[in-house]
Image (spheres, rainbow, N blue to C red):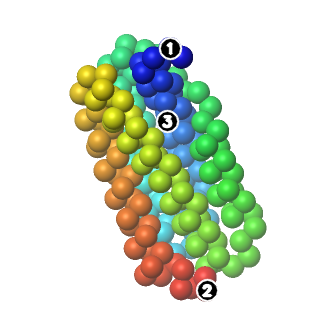
Amino acid sequence: MKDLNDLFLHMLKDVYHAEKQLVRALKQMSKKATTPELKQAFETHREETIGQIERLDQVFEILERAARGVPCEAMQGLVAEAKEVMEEAEEDSVMDAGLLAAAQAVEHYEIARYGTLIAWGRQLGLNDAVKLFEATLAEEKKTDQLLTQLAEKAVNQKAA
Ligand SMILES: [Fe+2]
């Protein structure tokens, strides 16, 4: 990688792969979650994530590059942690609290990545791509806030 263009493209591919992994993971997480609001939050964000992948497809088009991911080890690790919860939680309430925490780690990772893509995109003058990233970033932040509310309202108390 020689310049910001190269870094930008690499991060785009990384996030593309991450979002695709997340669609699969959220399906499993919504199956395993027991609190209805949490199940719904995972399902809603799964649908949003499919839309986010479409936005990334559009960014690849803007760049006139093939839409292709590179393995995102960070997301692989975060998904592995969620799987660990799914395998090891012995109580419904523990499952929910563990899955919620795993999902929040994912959102924070994505918020960091999209924040960087927006900053780099601005620097590179890719204004249409920046708008697409901003739409996705708003969804990630909203999801993070919803998860915080669910944790405070229901999930953590039950697990305690
Ligand atoms: Fe996302």
**In this rendering, would 38 be left or right of 79?**
left
Question: How many residues crowd around disc 3 within 10 Å: few (fewer than 14), some, or many (20 or more)?
Answer: many
Left or right: residue 131 versus residue 74 is: left
**Secondary structure state at the residue bearing disc 2:** loop
Q: Residue at x 47, y 53 (%)?
A: 107
Residue receiving disc 3: 15
Near mark 1 (Cα within 10 A), the count class, few <14, some 14-19 or many ≥20, is few
Percent of width and height locating residue 52: 39, 40
Question: In terms of sequence position, does the residue under pointer 1 or pointer 2 come before the other?
Answer: 1
Q: Secondary structure at mark 1?
A: loop
Which numbered tag is attached to residue 2? 1
Can residue 6 be seen in the rendering of this structure?
A: yes
Residue 5 coordinates in the image, percent (x, y): 41, 18
Q: Are marks 3 and 2 in contact (CB under 8 Å)?
A: no
Residue 78 location in percent, x, y? 62, 51
**Amino acid beneath label 2:** Ala
